[in-house]
């Protein structure tokens, strides 16, 4: 694992955007794995700046998002689809047909998981997967468990994830309890992985991911055995590392 520590969140975002931009410049037809959450928002702003400045084009890029809430329509203001449109897709020239996000309202969620997994294989797999990190060590919505889930699947969200997400919904009843998420196998098949974590709230999860045993109770710890992982941290997220 290559671990880089920066003074602040802004520098993490700039460094992350530079890595993605370099990937696109080297391979304009790159397949990118994208993430939601508050962590990558600044990175997406930096990517939009690079696009506006004519440095990169997304015209030939294909994207796959990690996850989507189950039961949330793509037009819902808290859907991950909407997040991606608002923070990135509406501001760049990616083709609508090149965007792939699990459909949280699919009539048959299991079939949707299989369709999503096949679409990734058809695109010849993800070249560069962007990840955030849950406070409990989750990546995508692979929650602490007794095993690592291989493929895209329907998952129950952990209580602490539900609590963390509650701030985005008006009533408790609206907070999703389930999601469709790429599996750990799906993520590990990516050629390169770029994980960002910022803030003191992530410090324990970062330590478990980097210095702990490989353990499905910290799903991100599996990244220790991926051959090409870059982790970008601010000083707070890195504060518990030896
Ligand atoms: C969500 C997403 C993850 C994300 C995590 C951290 O649960 N499914 O992909 O990495 O939360 O979010 P944040 O960046 O807001 O801390």
Image: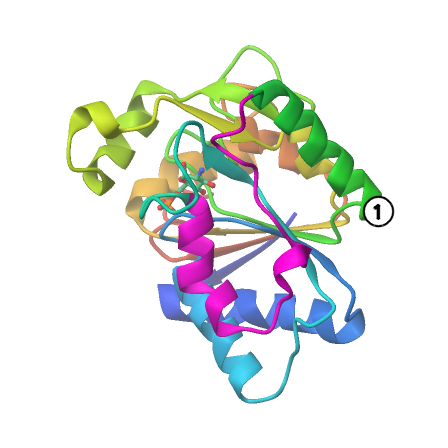
Q: Residue furthest left?
A: 171
Q: Position of residue 78 (x, y in %)?
A: 33, 44
Where does residue 226 sit, x and y in percent of width and height? Answer: 73, 39
Q: Is residue 9 magenta?
A: no
Choose between 52 and 141: the one closer to the eye.
52
Residue 74 in percent (x, y) is at: 43, 44
Q: How is the image coloured?
A: rainbow
Residue at the image point whose x is 40% and y is 22% from the top:
157
Residue at image mark 1 = 124
* Front residue of 75 and 3: 75
Q: Which residues are drawn in magenta?
A: 80-107
In the displayed structure image, the side of residue 172 where residue 134 appears, left or right: right
Q: Quadrant of residue 71?
A: top left
Q: Residue at x 53, y 35 (%)?
A: 209
Residue at x 66%, y 22% (from the top left corner): 111
Q: Position of residue 107 (x, y in %)?
A: 54, 23
Label 1 neighbour load within 10 Å: few <14, some 14-19, many 20+: few
* The furthest residue to the bottom: 53
Magenta residue check for 83 = yes
């Amino acid at each position: 694992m290559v671990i880089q520590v920066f003074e602040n969140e802004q520098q993490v975002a700039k460094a992350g955007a530079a890595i993605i931009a370099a990937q696109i410049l080297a391979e304009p037809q790159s397949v990118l794995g994208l993430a939601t959450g508050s962590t990558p928002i600044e990175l997406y702003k930096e990517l939009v700046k690079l696009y506006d400045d004519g440095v990169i084009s997304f015209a030939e890029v294909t994207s796959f998002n990690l996850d989507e809430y189950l039961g949330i329509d793509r037009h819902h203001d808290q859907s991950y689809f909407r997040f991606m449109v608002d923070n990135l897709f509406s501001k760049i020239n990616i083709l609508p047909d090149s965007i792939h996000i699990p459909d949280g309202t699919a009539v048959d969620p299991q079939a949707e998981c299989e369709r999503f997994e096949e679409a990734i294989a058809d695109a010849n797999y993800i070249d560069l997967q962007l990840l955030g990190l849950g406070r409990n060590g989750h990546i995508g919505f692979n929650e602490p468990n007794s095993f690592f889930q291989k493929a895209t699947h329907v998952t129950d969200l952990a209580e602490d994830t539900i609590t963390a997400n509650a701030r985005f919904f008006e009533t408790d009843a609206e907070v999703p309890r389930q999601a469709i998420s790429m599996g750990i196998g799906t993520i590990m098949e990516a050629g390169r992985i770029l994980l960002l974590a910022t803030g003191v709230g992530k410090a324990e999860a970062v330590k478990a991911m980097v210095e702990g045993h490989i353990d499905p109770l910290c799903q991100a710890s599996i990244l220790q055995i991926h051959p090409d992982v870059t982790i970008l941290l601010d000083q707070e997220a890195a504060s518990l590392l030896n």
